[in-house]
Image (cartoon, rainbow, N blue to C red):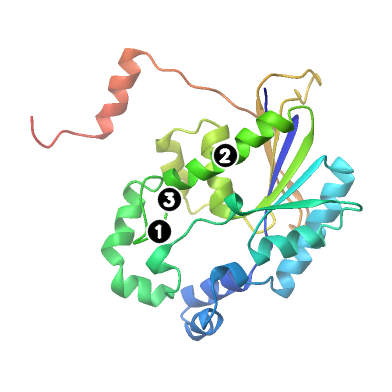
Amino acid sequence: MTLPIDLVFLRHGQSEGNLAKRRSEAGEHGVYDAIHAGRHTRSFRLTADGRRQAMMAGEWLRKEFGFFDRYMVSDYARAIETAALLDFEGASWRINDLLTERSWGELDRCSEQERAQKFASVLDMRDIEPFYWSPPSGESLQLLRVRLDRVLGTLHRECSDKKVILTCHGEVMWTYRVMLEHMPQGEFRRLHLSKNPLDRLHNCEILHYTRRNPATNALSPHADWVRRIRPSDNPIWVSNWKKIERKQYTNAELLGILDQYPAVVS
């Protein structure tokens, strides 16, 4: 059993929650409280910009792939709305609650101001080990990985010769990047801390993994190549193909990794 020939992840378009977070970071905290009043993050809809991004992503995807053999979408409203606006004729979407966004627990309903006031020391720890860090009463990315791996198991069993699209969320896609690209934790931390916009996963950004060698069209048993696309950029941004390397370590290299963790006692 292998992964699909083409496995495509799409982040949802800009949501009410995304917009409120940006405004809260700029000092406008009221809108954050307003959208959370009596609501769960599951119900957040797309903004006007988010709907535009979704339609532009759909245009690019239809031209590039024509159709998919399987369409999967998170159970959250912003992902469902994005999926519908892609406008694939005859698409039959499967809603999968395993693809829902990471839970931020007690921090989910906090504005940026509240987070800074109440959880500063907790958030500092996130920058130390971002993949293993857990928000209070929430999920670490490591725990998120457990439920996301079940989706890959289904794709291995049922879709190995197919084209598949999953419309989901930013931290879901980051976790799949770690899994599928065999990303070392040091590299993940570097990207987490990076201020370079090219290192972020933007709304309606696409991750395209393939088993088909882009240069020769030969099929590999593994999803060995990945590229990223931002269809709502002007002009559309498409990265080069990246060959995924599955790093293995010598004894000396393992000991070298430990240099970044100096012992406190001996």
Secondary structure category for the residue under label 1: loop
Q: Is residue 152 above or below residue 198?
A: above
Query: What label sits on residue 150 in the rendered view?
Result: 2
The reply to whether the C-beta atoms of the residues labelled 1 and 3 are less than 8 Å apart is: no
Instruction: Tell me the amino acid under the disc marked 3.
Output: Leu
Q: Nearer the viewer, residue 52 or 211?
A: 211
Q: Nearer the viewer, mark 2 or mark 1?
A: 2
Name the residue at 37% across, 59% down: 135
Residue 50 place in picture, x, y as percent? 71, 67
Residue type beneath disc 1: Gly
Q: Amino acid at mark 2?
A: Arg
The residue positioned 28% from the left and 21% from the top of the image is 255
Q: Nearer the viewer, residue 48 or 96?
A: 96
Residue 81, image quadrant:
bottom right
Q: How many residues crowd mark 3 within 10 Å: few (<14), some (14–19), many (20+)?
A: few
Q: Tell us which disc is closer to us: 1 or 3.
A: 1
- Mark on residue 138? 1
**Residue 220, how many percent across, how many down?**
71, 19
Question: How many numbered callouts?
Answer: 3
Farthest residue, direction left? 266
**Residue for badge 3:** 193
In-front residue for pair 235/24? 24
Q: Quadrant of residue 158?
A: top right
SS at mark 2 in the image: helix
Position of 200 with respect to 164 (left or right) is left
- What is the secondary structure assignment of the residue under circle 3? helix
Left or right of residue 224: residue 137: left
As drawn, 177 above or below 47: above
